[in-house]
Every structure is written in C-alpha cells, then in structure tokens.
Image (spheres, rainbow, N blue to C red):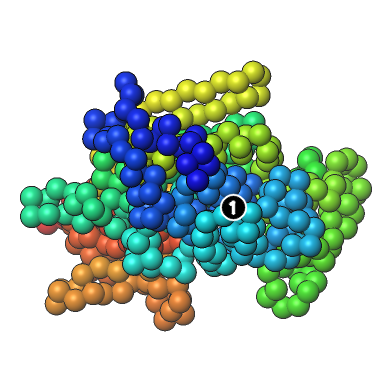
Amino acid sequence: MANRWKHVTNMIERSGPFTHPEFTASDENLSIMREYVKVLVVGAGGLGCELLKNLALNGFVNIHVIDMDTIDVSNLNRQFLFRQSDVCKPKAEVAAAFINERIPGAKVTPHFAKIQDFDEEFYGSFEIIICGLDSVVARRWLNNMIVGLLRYDENDEVDESSVKPLIDGGTEGFKGNVRVILPGRSPCIECTLNLYPPQITYPLCTIAHTPRLPEHCVEYVRLLLWPQDQPFGDKVSIDGDDPQHINWIFTRSIERANDHSIQGVTYRLVQGVIKHIVPAVASTNAVIAAQCATEAIKLATCAAPPLNNYMVFNDTDGVYSYSFEGERNPDCPTCSSKPIRVAARRGDTLKAVLVKVEEELGLRGVKAVTTVGSDGGNRTLYMSVLHEQTRKNLEKTLIDLGLHEGQEVYIVDETRPNHVTIQLHYTELVES
C-alpha cells in the first residue's frame, strides 16, 4: 500500500521551499485526504473522464460525478471510460462503474441528472468542486450556487467554513484553461465573463435569403424549416442526440446547399452546428485535467499554494502556458454585495428594461421578476410559468408599475439559482 501511493506521499508528506505556510508535514495527510475530503466532479465527458481517473489514482476516495448526458458513438474516440456497448447509457453511471471496478478503493457515486436538480445542501456537502463543463450557462449557474453558499459573521467577514473552492477546467481544440475560484476572495466566473468567447451566431436575413456558408444551410433548417414542417410531431424540439432528427436536418441542409451551390455540408458539420460542438483533442483534455487534479491535491492538503488564479494553455504551435491573477469586479452581479445600478426612464416599459439588463449583464431566459411592495411583502411583476397572467406587466411603464427611484428589482434567469438585484435610477428629472 505504501508503494502504491509513493508518488502522492512524496508531495504531501514532505516539507519544501514551495509548500504553503499552513502546511504541516505528516504521514497522516494521505489518510486525511482519503477519508475526509469529498470531491464533486461536474461533467463526465472528455475532461470529466480524465478528471475521475486522475483523482482516483491520486488517492481521492469519496468522489461524486454529475452528468445529464448519455454516451454517443462519437464520444468513444477520446472519452476512454466508455465502450461500444455503453452507447446510449448515462455517462455518469458508466464512468463511475468503470473507475470503481478498475481502481481498488475508489468510491465514485454517479448522478444522472442536471446540476439544477440539486440544492444548497447537496453542493455544501463537498470540500472541493471541479467543473469540466462545455457550457458557459451551466458554469455561471454553478458559480452562482457556490457563491450563494457563503456565510458571514457579525463583522461581515466570510466564514471560512462556508467557502467551497471551485476548480474550473475548459478545453477547445488545442487550447485550454484552468482557474481556481475561492468564493469571496478571488474573482468568480461572473467577474470575468468577458474571458469566454461569444457563441457564433448568424444574421437571420442571411440565413433566409443569401446563404453563403454550409452552416447557413443547417441554421436555415434548424430555425425555419423545423418549426414550419414539425417533422416529428407538434412541439417536438430538436434532439441533437437523436439520429433521426440529425438525419432529417442533414437531408434538408443538403437540399438547401444544392439550391445555392454551397459545398461542405456533412453529417459531422450538422452535428456540430446543432449541438454547438467544439473540437476536442484528447491530449489537451489530459493536460488540463492533470492541472485540475494537482490543484485539488493542493487545496486538500496545503502542500502548495493554489493557482492564483488563472492559467491558459496552448499547444497549437509548440507548447505554451501562462498564468495570471485575475481581479474581482466590484460591480459583479454575483459576488458583490451591492445591487447593480441600472439607468432607465420612467416611461420605459418593464420589457425594455429587461432587454437592457439582459444585454448588460449577459442574462438569459428571464424566469421571474419581483420587487418589494408598499406593504413590505413580495410583489411579482413577471413569471415565465405564469406568462399569460403576468405578460401584461411587460408592456407597462415603470411609473405605471409604481417603481420609484432607487427601487430594487430582483431577477431570476436560467444562468443562476439565485436572483440578481438591480436598482433603478431614473435619468430624467421629475416634472414639477
């Protein structure tokens, strides 16, 4: 047993010039890490498979993994925990079973579910959370959940026991990044949202009338033909993992491309456009996962200071990596304690203000808008689940809704489990 973990004990049981000031060299560090540190891995795809393997082989025992996807045949070239016989099975369950069987002592618990299916109690039960997602929206939701776990003492100082470190890894082709987020101390994902590239979109007029690219043909079928033809029944949404859906879109995209003499429409391209697939390179996943696992060991044992706080990797031409310290945004809608100031006019409609807020804060899919009524109780201005009953408020002006200067409005959208608070500030003077 001692030889099995020698590569780990060399790092966590000996002092050195780079150890953390709070580090204590002890032969009990490994047993503490194995028995008491509970780790959550979010995502069991290309990066998640590497993460689960690295964590288990480096001594972590109590590991949970969440993933809502099932295994597709296209995953098999890089997601090495899966086999041909696993196609259509839940990724989390297959990955957990593979690790548990292959690595003695590992106890990986799978959750075939969405991250939104779990509450604060669940996320608060982990010492370390590692994110291997391919969605910025999901990252923002998880970030908001973890920041929301923070508790403060009577001096308004962060209770250290409520800090849940988030290690975020991401890859795209030959590029990757790792960041360590200590909520309340380092910048959160929302603070540096501009670091994520915007998703590629195409003007609808170009798609409909003057397509030039094969992607335009696919988007034409997705946005216009599918709702019009409803090939698989009324209100059936596109399922990027359903071969019948992809084949139908592929066939219609070829027809559109032939009509406009466009080359390059392939089945793989259709999958990529529909599922927003980014190129995946196994070696990049391996490098980023290794860095994430190393950061987990640092956080669990204090063997070395954690990354401070962002590292980028690029092996497009040679191998290049660079780390830098990101800065917190004092006006961050997630980790700052003050409401976001929003300039508006009294004659603006609630809908216009929401559109402005969505653009400025990057919100998506507003679910609820509330405020505090004159009686001190909660007042609902809009709820997506009660759209028919509340949509009339969207066309009302702020003054008609009784929203005064400095009033706080609370908005919930799909990027966060908790609301963001805005404060209205009117730009025109009140007429006397």
The C terminus is located in which quarter?
Answer: bottom left
Q: Nearer the viewer, residue 220 or 293?
A: 293
Give the residue at x 41% y 51%: 34
Left or right side of 78 for 261: right
Task: Tell me the kind of residue under disc 1.
Answer: Ile
Is residue 285 something that shows in the picture? yes
Instruction: Write down the residue under mark 1.
Output: 103
Q: Nearer the viewer, residue 315 or 233?
A: 315
Give the residue at x 35% y 62%: 125
Q: Where does the image place residue 224, in percent across and percent down from the top left?
A: 73, 61
Give the residue at x 15% y 74%: 376
Residue 11, above or below 392: above
Q: Where does the image place residue 43, in percent across and percent down from the top left?
A: 55, 54
Q: Where does the image place residue 167, in percent across and percent down from the top left?
A: 43, 44
In the displayed orientation, state which residue is furthest to the top. Answer: 318
Q: Where does the image place residue 263, in percent across and percent down from the top left?
A: 88, 40
Q: Nearer the viewer, residue 316 or 1?
A: 1
Is residue 40 something that shows in the picture? no
Left or right side of 98 for 256: right
Give the residue at x 14% y 48%: 157
Q: Quadrant of residue 285?
A: top right
Q: Quadrant of residue 381?
A: bottom left
Left or right side of 76 for 130: left
In the displayed orientation, state which residue is furthest to the bottom. Answer: 389
Q: Residues within 10 Å of mark 1 (few under 14, many from 20)?
A: few
Residue 386, above or below 402: below
